[in-house]
Image (spheres, grey):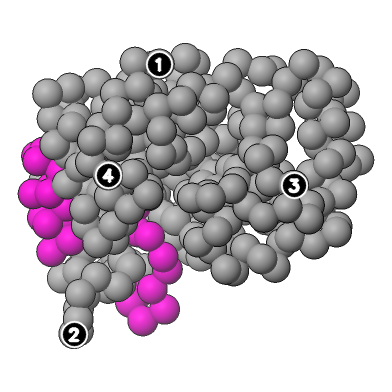
Amino acid sequence: MEYRRLGNTGLEVSVLGLGGNNFGVRADEEMSNRVIDQAMELGVNFIDTANIYAGTRSEEIVGKQIKPKRQQVVLVTKFGAQLGEGPNTRGGSRKHVMDSAEASLRRLQTDYIDLYLIHFPDDLTPIEETLRAMEDLVQDGKVRYIGCSNFVAWRACEAAWTAKGLNRPGFVCIQNHYNLLVREPERDVIPFCEEYQWSMMPYFPLASGLLTGKYRLGEEPPAGSRMTSMKTMASVLNEESWAIITALEKFSQERGRTLLELAHAWLLANPVVDSVISGATKPEQVVANAKGVDWKLSAEDMAAIDEIVPSPRPPARP
């Protein structure tokens, strides 16, 4: 397993991360434990969860399973999404940040979180308030590093400059939706990460299964697959998407690889991507995901992929 430094920090993370969004939902506790064990056996040290996954159940499963091996894990969790009823149960207010951190620490059965992310931007709370609260958690030793998720570029830049004004380190990474079929982050988020030395951690690298090769045009999704439970994904099942997927699959097969491997290899060819967050419901899926991280795409490969699915990235500055 390859390890990369997270952004401009000294923290080393495995290029393959394990997403915990399936734990307690599409994988019961016993299967989730097997997935976690398989990932760690392969050298994965980066495990990502959130306080809303499976109604907090994911954090409980992850915390219990990694407790004997806590020092081997870079543990990521998130706060900010709606959790519970009533006021102060979402967002980036100092109260919610502090309350959420304490609750996550209890569920994870640990006294510190390696990387703590605000899950979604909060339009009602000044980013300064959120940053001060998160930095106080760092000062208290309850959190090691902080970051954000689902931020557009201007929000990330606002957070960076606010932290600079406070003379605090601020966020070190951003976790956003990014894959071969969703390249919008290349317009501005990726250039921002390059300029400010933030780490990009893509989630949904397999486009909810579309980049696994298990779906076929005109055929019903396999029973139990993510596509059968995600009605919103029906919008991406169009002829244009299938033409791209077919071409990418052909590209992979010509090189003796799979589409799933290409999905991971392509993301990791980007220097600002330090770890790809991949979920799994079975141990064998972790093994399959890991095969892609060893594939080093050439400049010619990357150019060929751009021909299949063009980048929306703006021209390079002179």
Question: From mark 2 to mark 1, how far is it between C-alphas?
Answer: 43 Å
Q: Mark 2 or 3 closer to N-term?
A: 2
x and y percentages locating residue 222 in the rendered image: 59, 48
Q: Which residue is mark 3?
A: 216
Question: From mark 3 to mark 1, how far is it between C-alphas?
Answer: 30 Å
The mark lying in front, picked from 2 and 4, is 4
On the picture, is 100 further left or further right than 225? left
Q: Amino acid at mark 4?
A: Asp
Label 2 with label 3: CB-CB less than 8 Å? no
Q: Residue at x 9, y 41 (%)?
A: 109
Question: From the viewer's perspective, is residue 186 above or below residue 158?
Answer: above
Q: Quadrant of residue 246?
A: top right
Q: Which residue is mark 4?
A: 28
Query: Relative to the observer, which residue lies in front, 161 or 232?
Result: 232
Q: Residues within 10 Å of mark 4 (few under 14, many from 20)?
A: some
Q: Mark 2 or 1 closer to N-term?
A: 1
- Secondary structure of the residue carrying tag 2 is loop
Question: From mark 2 to mark 3, how far is it between C-alphas?
Answer: 44 Å
The mark lying in front, picked from 2 and 1, is 1
Question: From mark 3 to mark 4, how far is it between C-alphas?
Answer: 28 Å
Q: Residue at x 85, y 59 (%)?
A: 239
Q: Which residue is mark 2?
A: 86
Question: From mark 2 to mark 4, how far is it between C-alphas?
Answer: 29 Å
Q: Which residue is mark 1?
A: 42
x and y percentages locating residue 94 in the rendered image: 19, 68
